[in-house]
Image (spheres, helix red, strand yellow):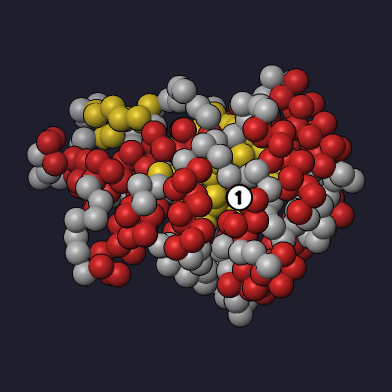
Amino acid sequence: MSKRLTLPGFVNAHSHAFQRALRGSAGSGDFWGWRESMLDLAGSQTPASVRESYEGVYREMLANGWTAVGEFHYLGLEEALAAAEAAEAAGIEVVLLYAAYGRGGLDRFRQSSPAAYLRRVEELAGKGLRVGLAPHSVRACPRDWLEEIGRYAAGSDFVLHVHADEQPREIEECVAEHGLRPIQLLGETGCLGPRTTVVHATHANDRELDLIADAGARVCLCPTTEANLADGFAPVERLVERGIGICVGSDSNVRIDPLEELREVDGIARRQMLRRDLFSAGDLLCFGSDEGAAALGLDEWPEVAVDLGHRSLSGIDESDVPCALVYGCAGDVFATD
Ligand SMILES: [Zn+2]
């Protein structure tokens, strides 16, 4: 057996495991066209299909260095339990980010009221599962839902994850309905706090990023998915200027490789700034592990072992391994035994 280097495991702060099945389909116009395919797929899921396919996706995550995952789940309660079983069978740490869905989407996504939603969250937590609050988005949650969930979050220890500003249309619709942009609405309804993770924030303006910074909230970037879905470029320079914590997720799971997510974050910075030093390799590795764990409320999670004999590290001094990982390796560099 070749030499190993142990590192903190990578923490996947945002996953929808069932969407992995869409990787074999090509483009569909824009994000909204893709969403139709995704909704068709979501509608066909059962507890049995979730139990089987999620285990496969989670095993793939583990094989590529993700040792914990936040599963942002909107397929219903029985399927949430099946997802937790799949994670246990695969051996990955999971936090079920159980989605509140008040309108739109499919029937199966929706609860009858915020109170009914919060009962579901408590039911899952009562079974000993790690759970987080996840008002899906300002599209799916009316203002009174956000207010009730925000109030509940403030009085609990749960983390709160929410999609925001992934696409310009979502912002236009939110401004038309509320006179506020999505992250402003999250701020006004009590959904922005130090345990909040805003997923994407791709089209957030400066005012919205200031609100995230002032709240001590984080942003989860999912750059391989954001590229695949034609979302846009993450505002990495403006996140760094404000000292906003960054974590990463594999989201649609079109790719399952933490090193590729981190390299994409760094690549956006380099292309946009014409500079190579916005992030150090250490910063990027921290986004992939510690920041993701903090976003999920995890104090402990398993480590990963780098296979120093792997061909992609040939000729690399041990002291240069962190850089070589993020700039020149894929997830197969991690030992799986
Ligand atoms: Zn998502």
Left or right, residue 226 beside residue 319: right
Q: For mark 1, give the secondary structure.
A: helix
Question: How far across and how far down the image is residue 283, in percent?
Answer: 28, 43
Image quarter of residue 301: top left
**Is any atom of residue 43 visible in this view?**
no
Residue shown at the point (51%, 37%) measured from the top left: 194
Image quarter of residue 57: top right
Residue shown at the point (79%, 34%) measured from the top left: 118
Question: How far across and how far down the image is residue 234, in percent?
Answer: 43, 62
Seen from the viewer's position, the closer of residues 41 and 212 is 212
Residue shown at the point (46%, 33%) measured from the top left: 293
Left or right, residue 30 beside residue 299: right
**Is any atom of residue 184 visible in this view?**
yes
Seen from the viewer's position, the closer of residues 79 and 230 is 230
Question: How far across and how far down the image is residue 315, in percent?
Answer: 10, 45
- Residue lying at the far right in this picture: please name it: 112
Seen from the viewer's position, the closer of residues 248 and 190 is 190
Left or right, residue 289 beside residue 161: left
Q: Is mark 1 within 8 Å of ligand 1?
A: no
Q: Amino acid at mark 1?
A: Gly
How would you rate the neighbour count of disc 1 (Cα within 10 Å): few for under 14, some for 14-19, many for 20 or more?
some
**Quadrant the N terminus occupies:** top left
- Is residue 320 placed above or below 178 in the rendered structure? above
Residue that numbered label 1 is attached to: 187
Residue shown at the point (56%, 39%) measured from the top left: 193
**Quadrant the C terminus occupies:** top left
